[in-house]
Amino acid sequence: MPNRAGLILFLLLLPLTRNPAMAEPCGQVIGIVTHDATTTRYVLSTPADGAAASPPTTLLLLPGGDGHLGLDDDGCPALLAGNSLVRMQSLFQRDGFATALADTPSDHAGEDGLKGFRIERQHAEDLGGIILDLRRRVGGAVWLLGTSRGTISAVNAASRLRGPAAPDGLVLTSVLTNGDAFARKTWVAQTVFDLPLETLAMPVLLVGHKDDRCIRSPPDMMAEVAARLNHVTRRQVAVVAGGSGGSESFRDIASCRGQSPHGFFGQEDEVAATIARFIHDAPDR
């Protein structure tokens, strides 16, 4: 039997190590009071040194799926780490943007997360509260970026909010345009077409992948979304191709996940650059 005291001393002298992915905080964790006295947390991250205007534009990022990130105290997501907007945060910061990654309210951290709540007025007002908080903390413009099922949240907020709580612009990637009216859970039928797209009056960018095989976001449906944007100040439909996401079967659930064309896997740089050019109102190269 080894000497117990010696073993304890050996263990105490071992260097303490952390998971490299968690070695540094992901940003400043901020909590605000939202609907019905709930709390919503988001993580605010600053632009890369020397890359930003003063004050910078902030991108409020709304991931898809159930929206529940499980942010830890360092602002790092325990869930949805493969989501395209979560993965592209550092690219946006490189391009001079601050980023704010929003988690679910404290009463929507269960199995379904946001799901059916994405279309409700209270959800829009919660996001308006984050926008107001960002204007106070950062200054500058605030744009909403939603991907996949997060596009429902983004359009909901952009169409309902007014004044300082309203976003300055809107970016929708892998737009959720095709629901399932026969699904067991009614919220699966929801799409951006259930919201008043015609009332949007801000710049709007739509981004899709030519090879997106997710049944919920066929890229050719972006044209119909764009056709309903009658009052926007500026609009653009951008379609990217390539990447390393493979070519899943059209009905394979994996085709709606992050490591696929739906999540712009392998095309992150191109998508981030396209978004940056549109926000800065710069011509395509």
Image (cartoon, helix red, strand yellow):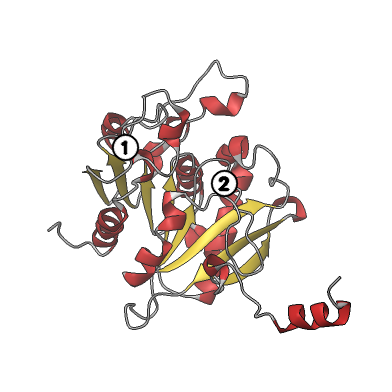
Q: Residues within 10 Å of mark 1 (few under 14, many from 20)?
A: some
Q: Nearer the viewer, residue 187 or 202?
A: 187
> Residue 108 location in percent, x, y?
69, 45
Can I make out residue 119 in this image? yes
Query: Which residue does the image show at 31% across and 37% down from the upper left?
Result: 246
Compared to 54, does 166 lie above or below?
Answer: above
- For badge 2, the amino acid type reads Gly
Quadrant, the C terminus: bottom left
Q: Which residue is disc 1 drawn over?
A: 246
Cα–Cα span, label 1 and label 2: 24 Å
Query: Which residue does the image show at 51% across and 29% down from the upper left?
Result: 190
> Residue 218 location in percent, x, y?
33, 30
Q: Earlier in the sequence, mark 1 or mark 2?
A: 2
Query: Which residue does the image show at 34% across and 52% down from the upper left?
Result: 202
Q: Which residue is disc 2 drawn over?
A: 67
Quadrant, the N terminus: bottom right
Q: Is residue 235 left or right of residue 193?
A: left
Q: Give the label on residue 108, or none.
A: none
Q: Residue furthest front?
A: 1
Query: Which residue does the image show at 47% across and 56% down from the upper left?
Result: 86
Q: Tag 2's secondary structure?
A: loop
